Amino acid sequence: MPKLSIQEGLLPGKTVEERLAAAGHLNIDAVEFPAADLDARLPRIAEALDANGIKASGINMGRQDGCLSADVARRAAAVDALREALTCAFDLEADYVTFVPQCGETDLPDLTPYASPMELQKELLIWLLRGVSDLCDAMDVQLALQPLNHYETSFITRLDQAVHFRRQVDDHPKITVAANLYHMALEEDDLVAALRQHNDDISLVYLSENNRRLPGQGILPFSAIGEALTEMAFDGWLVLEGLEATDNPERARQSFQELPGSIQFLRGAGLL
């Protein structure tokens, strides 16, 4: 059976202790944490996880990219940040780090006929995945490539594109794919068919609606998605994602009030 997690930013509270207590009240299995400034927060997070009997499902790099940048210093710093996130995941006993290789447009040069910017991006990503796969093995942490919609990236927008890079590293068991329903709704011809097609590559699914609100507050076919995941015998993480509420107290309260109904909706759709 899949396991349910929620992004920290969807939980109300000014401190991590308050947010994890809120997750505990919802009987959610785990929380996903943002990578930004995570190293400094590790001791408090670890204590709060233990106090509430909750697991860290994974770490999300968010919009921290740069691994495919033309600038050598920026590229090196981004790779270091990715390695640090993998180390933090190990420290928190989390299962994965979600990673978007490129946000927005590339700054790589056009070296046609030698190589186009897209070709350079592909080569850099393959090099990166080969370089970090040993660390993923050592840490026993998955690196999950997440496609974004074409409004947010000019690079990887569909599951099959992310899967292509997994093939380039011989389907390394620690290099996987994160399927985000919001982005898939914008890019895949058939969202449910895409999930089925790439069953063996997907390690986690981000649950949000076509309007990026909580499941049940939009028009995505969650019953068909639940049926597909059941047929796939999917046993990875289902991560509740939505409009982050951490910096908006009123939105945080509203989101928290909406979460039980959304979780019940997922159960009715066969996802839990």
Image (spheres, grey):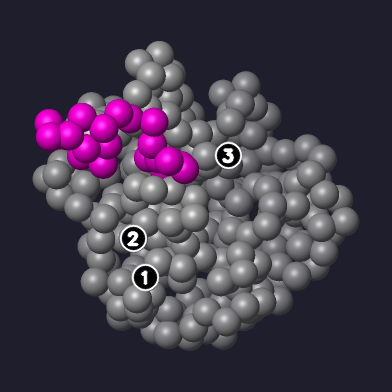
Q: Quadrant of residue 178?
A: bottom left
- The answer to the question of whether label 1 and label 3 lie on touching residues, with beta carbons closer than 8 A, is no
Number of callouts: 3
Q: Which residue is mark 2?
A: 158
Residue 216 in picture, x, y percent from top left: 63, 78
Q: Give the alpha-carbon distance from disc 1 to disc 2, as whole Å.
A: 6 Å
Query: Which mark is first along the chain, 2 or 3?
Result: 3
Identify the residue at horizontal 37%, vertical 27% (top origin): 69
Query: Which mark is first along the chain, 3 or 1?
Result: 3
Q: Secondary structure at mark 2?
A: loop
Q: Secondary structure at mark 3?
A: strand
Identify the residue at horizontal 25%, vertical 66% (top origin): 198
Identify the residue at horizontal 62%, vertical 78% (top origin): 218
Q: Is residue 125 rendered to the left or right of residue 61? A: left
Q: Is residue 25 rendered to the left or right of residue 96? A: right
- The answer to the question of whether label 1 and label 2 lie on touching residues, with beta carbons closer than 8 A, is yes
Q: Quadrant of residue 46?
A: top right
Q: Nearer the viewer, residue 240 or 189?
A: 189
Q: Is residue 132 above or below residue 244?
A: above
Q: Nearer the viewer, residue 238 or 36?
A: 36
| Dominant SS type (magenta) | loop
**Res. 188 mark:** 1
Read off the magenta span. Answer: 95-119
Q: Give the alpha-carbon distance from disc 1 to disc 3, as whole Å.
A: 26 Å
Q: Amino acid at mark 3?
A: Pro
Q: Is residue 75 above or below residue 7?
A: above
- The answer to the question of whether label 3 and label 2 lie on touching residues, with beta carbons closer than 8 A, is no
Mark nearer the viewer, 1 or 3? 1
Q: Amino acid at mark 1?
A: Glu
> How many neighbours does mark 2 have within 10 angstroms: few (below 14), some (14-19), or many (20 or more)?
many
